[in-house]
Image (spheres, grey):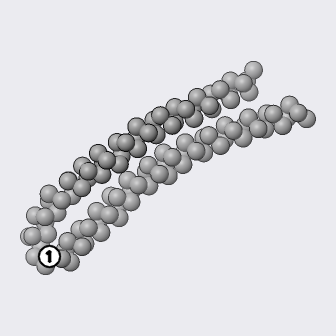
Amino acid sequence: VAQTLFTLSRESKVLHRVLQCCLLNGGVFMLSILLFEYGVLPGLNFFLSYLFSNSGTVSTVWGWMKPSLSLLFHSFWVAPLFLLSKIVNSLWFQDIADSAYKFRK
């Protein structure tokens, strides 16, 4: 009975770490990129078209604004989050590997 409980706790720890990795990478990281690309940028484009009635002005302003905002977003959010996720994922993957090794022993 004790061995079974020990095995279940180890399997639960592995499952917990795998779910944490999926949530960090798929949830936070991907969701923030999708929100920016399909929420923030189209919203700002709509706001500019509402603000400036001339479509030539909107396309000119949007022509320099979109790349600038994308560069800022990727530089100050995506790159630091990517580096942080690499560190955190490596710690969690090591924990998963340790638990799997102990389970196979």
Spot occupied by residue 98 in the image (x, y as percentages of width and height): 65, 26
Q: Quadrant of the N terminus?
A: top right
The part of the image, by quadrant, that contains residue 18 is top right
Regarding mark 1 in the picture, which secondary structure is present there? loop
Spot occupied by residue 58 in the image (x, y as percentages of width and height): 14, 69
Note whether 71 is above or below 88 in the view shown: below
Question: Is 5 placed left or right of 31 in the picture?
Answer: right
Residue at left offset 13%, top offset 64%: 61
Question: Is 51 placed left or right of 97 in the picture?
Answer: left
Question: Is 17 placed left or right of 70 in the picture?
Answer: right
Q: Name the kind of residue labelled 1 in the image.
A: Phe
How many tags in the picture?
A: 1
Q: Which residue is mark 1?
A: 52
Note whether 8 is above or below 49 in the view shown: above
Residue at left offset 29%, top offset 45%: 75
Spot occupied by residue 92 in the image (x, y as percentages of width and height): 57, 35
Residue at left offset 51%, top offset 36%: 89
Residue at left offset 38%, top offset 60%: 35
